[in-house]
């Protein structure tokens, strides 16, 4: 992939984000399993949606050095501002058709998601978001904005992307080692692959996912 991910290969454990956290106990299990970040979904159309009050309570309970990420899908500016006034977030994630000017207008850095399909030029897409900290690659499923549990064809990811790659889309404890070895992303992101039901994380699956990430650290 891009130079940032290649430089990291073999040097350290890939950063891991577990998204769609809705419960404090799941956030703590994720933290103690060794993840680097947790994600809150502020998109009302998602079964993993969490309100700012609950997200703030969960964020306050986290131990040190765990980043918090807020996911939005085509939000209004006032909606983002309300969330970041209530919740301690380290990073924003925009998962819709938001343009760069919108994504970069807040006081918090952001990553931009792309739903990968054969006719999407990822190099051109990434070039439209030069202010982003990274590009998150997810599976394209018609009418679904994310959290589908579907993988995509990793060969569609071109070399030379100008942003660090966060690989998402259908990752789970069984395939994450292979995914890292094939794609060599900067980081990986998982949601449904470590759940017992939608929005409810499974501590055993999260631990197994982390073991799969560690296996790729060779």
Image: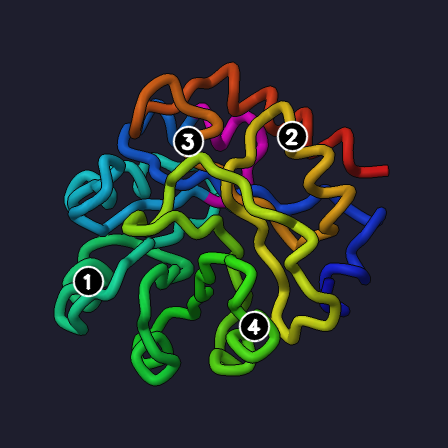
Give the residue at mark 1. 85
Give the residue at mark 4. 121
Is label 3 or label 1 in front? Answer: 3
Sequence-first disc among 2 and 1:
1
Query: What's the distance in space between the residues labelled 3 and 1, CA to CA?
Result: 28 Å
Left or right: 180, with 57 as reference point:
right
Sequence-first disc among 2 and 4:
4
Q: Specify whether residue 78 is painted magenta.
A: no
Q: Which residues are magenta?
A: 29-37
- Say what secondary structure mark 3 lies in: helix
Give the residue at mark 2. 175
- 77 over 171 or under it: above or below: below
- 88 over 152 or under it: above or below: below
Is label 2 or label 4 in front? Answer: 4
Query: What's the distance in space between the residues labelled 1 and 4, CA to CA?
Result: 35 Å
User: Which quadrant of the figure has residue 90?
Assistant: bottom left
Is label 2 or label 1 in front? Answer: 2
Image spot of residue 79 (x, y percent): 15, 64
Image spot of residue 53 (x, y percent): 15, 44
- Say what secondary structure mark 1 lies in: helix
In this view, the residue in front, 84 or 62, is: 84
Q: Quadrant of the N terminus?
A: bottom right
- 89 over 46 or under it: above or below: below
Assess whether mark 1 and mark 3 are in contact (beta carbons under 8 angstroms): no
Residue positioned 76% across, 69% down in the render: 3
Mark 4 Cα within 10 Å, few/some/many (few <14, many 20+)? few
Give the residue at mark 3. 192
């Amino acid at each position: 992939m891009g130079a940032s991910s290649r430089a990291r290969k073999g040097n350290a454990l890939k950063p891991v984000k577990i998204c769609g956290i809705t419960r404090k106990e799941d956030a703590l299990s994720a933290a103690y399993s060794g993840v680097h970040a947790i994600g809150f979904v502020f998109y009302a159309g998602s079964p993993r949606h969490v309100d700012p009050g609950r997200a703030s309570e969960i964020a306050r309970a986290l131990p040190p050095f765990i980043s918090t990420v807020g996911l939005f899908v085509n939000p209004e500016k006032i909606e983002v501002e309300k969330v970041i006034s209530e919740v301690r977030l380290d990073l924003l994630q925009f998962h819709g058709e938001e343009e760069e000017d919108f994504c970069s207008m807040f006081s918090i850095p952001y990553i931009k998601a792309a739903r990968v399909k054969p006719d999407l030029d990822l190099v051109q897409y990434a070039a439209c978001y030069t202010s982003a900290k990274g590009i998150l690659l997810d599976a394209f499923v018609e009418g679904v904005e994310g959290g589908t549990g579907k993988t995509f064809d990793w060969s569609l990811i071109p070399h030379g992307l100008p942003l660090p790659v966060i690989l998402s889309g259908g990752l789970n404890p069984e395939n994450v080692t292979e995914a890292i070895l094939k794609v060599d992303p900067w980081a990986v992101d998982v949601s449904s692959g470590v759940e017992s039901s939608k929005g409810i994380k499974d501590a055993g699956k999260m631990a197994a996912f982390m073991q799969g990430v560690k296996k790729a650290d060779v």
